[in-house]
Image (spheres, grey):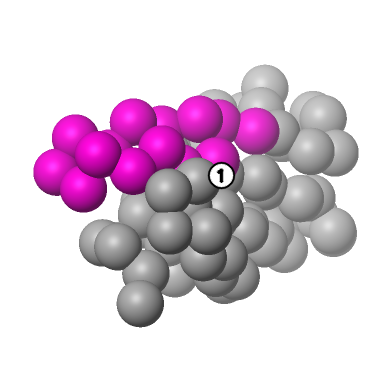
């Protein structure tokens, strides 16, 4: 089970310039370090993968679904 619901940070316009943008988030509640990778597939069509370092679970979804 994925430990908590990771939320991608709000994307700034300059973040969309690169094809892949990566954030490392510290999840204080779960104490689970999360890497969020956002891939720009098409303009306005972003997908994000969330990899939980501790529990080694990965989830995929659109940035909108992840709260970004």
34 or 21: which is nearer to us? Answer: 34
Q: Is residue 25 magenta?
A: yes
Q: Residue at x 79, y 50 (%)?
A: 40
Q: Quadrant of the N terminus?
A: bottom left
Residue 32, visible in the rendered structure:
yes
x, y percentage for residue 45? 72, 63
Asked where in the image residue 50 lies, by quadrant, the reply is bottom right
Asked where in the image residue 49 lies, by quadrant, the reply is bottom right
x, y percentage for residue 18? 82, 30
Q: Residue furthest bottom?
A: 1
Q: Residue at x 57, y 65 (%)?
A: 58
Q: Residue furthest left?
A: 29
**What secondary structure do most residues of the magenta stretch adopt?**
strand
x, y percentage for residue 8? 44, 47
Q: Image height check: is 42 above or below 21?
A: below
Q: Which residues are magenta?
A: 22-35
Q: Is residue 68 magenta?
A: no
29 or 64: which is nearer to us? Answer: 29
Residue denoted by label 1 = 36
Q: Residue at x 48, y 52 (%)?
A: 52
Q: Residue at x 51, y 65 (%)?
A: 57
Tell me the element at label 1.
strand
Asked where in the image residue 47 lies, by quadrant, the reply is bottom right
56 or 16: which is nearer to us? Answer: 56
Residue 64, visible in the rendered structure:
no
Q: Give the left or right position of residue 60, taking residue 27 as reference.
A: right
Query: What is the crowding at mark 1: few (fewer than 14 residues within 10 Å), some, or many (at least 20)?
Result: many
């Amino acid at each position: 089970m994925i430990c908590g619901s990771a939320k991608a940070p709000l994307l700034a316009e300059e973040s969309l310039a690169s094809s892949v943008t990566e954030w490392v988030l510290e999840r204080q509640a779960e104490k689970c370090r999360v890497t969020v990778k956002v891939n720009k597939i098409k303009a306005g069509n972003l997908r994000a993968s969330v990899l939980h370092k501790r529990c080694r679970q990965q989830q995929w979804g659109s940035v909108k679904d992840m709260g970004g």
